[in-house]
Amino acid sequence: MMANLEYYKVFYHVVKCGSVTQAAGVLSLSQPAVSQSLKQLETALGVVLVKRTSHGITPTAEGRELFSFVEKGYEQFEAGEKRILQMCNLERGEITIGASDMTLRFFLLPYLERFHEKNPGIKVTVTNGPTPATMDLLREGKIDFGVVSGPVLPEEGIGMFPVKEIEDIFVIGKNFSQYAGKAHPLKLLEQLPLITMEKPTSTRKYVQGFLEERGVRINPEFELATSDMIVQFALRNLGVGSVVRDFAAQELASGELMELKFEEPVPVRDFLVVTDERSRKSLAAAALLEMMKKDALIRGEIK
């Protein structure tokens, strides 16, 4: 059975210092306590580890052999403690995040920039994917947290808080300008070519669900992987684009696109930060989450 680790600690410092007196000072122990620990380690191993000379303490052949291993182990312990201290001070660490193109671009990216400026030693990995894929990664413990598009159904063990309101709108190019300037019944969407996100996305599910609840059945002309592409298709007058307003803000401001308004607009929803409440976050992840939550409280996103 391995001897008490404290004995090895004493042995390491005695050999390193070459003196019981100096080792006692480093360890904040009395000289008799240091000598006793050495004696107990020698008894446990059945060998003499050090010998006393007029010049201090020197290891025996067995002592030198043992010290070559103890030194490596002790220095590894010290390195481990130093690494933990660096992680506590956010000098080192790692964060894994799940986010979509939309949540990354219109919410998460500025936070990553701020966090990196303050804590450049933290490695951040962002896994890109739609809300359903991000939720799966969270459940599997593969990410520290996710930033997703709501709504998300409540789930046992999953915590969430809103961080930014988003608005789903419909945009049209100049060839559809006859529809601009007034609010239409939602049924108009059944008569026009529609450009939407693909079905697995939360955005498509939310908008389509809203329309179906009001008796509007859509059959999109184009189903695309990204909102940026929807904007590009709308600019080329290929149909009515269903996008989050932020994606088309520049084109709306310049007049390249117009908003197609309806008598009943799509209700606003939120970007949500989602976490697994059953697992502990890394110190770095907890710090970034706290930054986002604090800002959301100030803005009034969290009621």
Image (tube, rainbow, N blue to C red):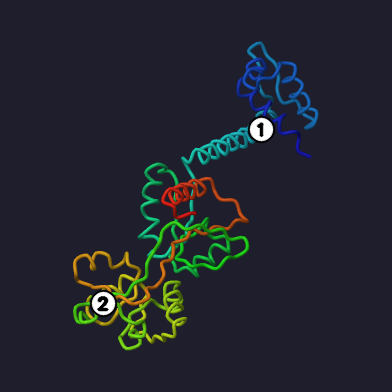
Residue that label 2 marks: 182
Task: Tell me where residue 39 appears, x and y as whole percent.
Answer: 77, 23
- Figure check: 243 above or below 221: above
Q: Earlier in the sequence, mark 1 or mark 2?
A: 1
Mark 1 and mark 2: Cα distance apart in space:
88 Å
Please tell me in which quadrant of the rendered image residue 67 appears.
top right
How many numbered marks does the figure carry?
Answer: 2
Q: Along the line of sight, which residue is nearer the eye, 148 or 140?
A: 148
Q: Residue furthest top?
A: 54
Which numbered tag is attached to residue 266?
none
Q: Along the line of sight, which residue is nearer the eye, 114 or 219?
A: 219
Task: Tell me where residue 260 appears, x and y as whole percent.
Answer: 28, 76
Q: Look at 72% across and 26% down and name the residue there.
A: 49
Task: Tell me where residue 203 appears, x and y as whole percent.
Answer: 42, 72
- Figure check: 32 above or below 243: above
Tell me the crowding category of disc 1: few under 14, some 14 to 19, or many 20 or more residues within 10 angstroms, Cα based: few
Residue that label 1 marks: 65
In the image: residue 288, left or right of residue 55? left
- Figure check: 280 above or below 154: above
For the N terminus, the quadrant is: top right
Q: Along the line of sight, which residue is nearer the eye, 270 or 84?
A: 270
In the image: residue 232, left or right of residue 293? left
Task: Tell me where residue 240 appears, x and y as whole percent.
Answer: 29, 80
In the image: residue 94, left or right of residue 226? right
Q: Look at 22% across and 78% down and name the residue there.
A: 236
Q: Secondary structure at mark 2?
A: loop
Instruction: Tell me the kind of residue under disc 1.
Output: Glu
Q: Along the line of sight, which residue is nearer the eye, 246 or 78?
A: 246
Instruction: Tell me the kind of residue under disc 2.
Output: Lys
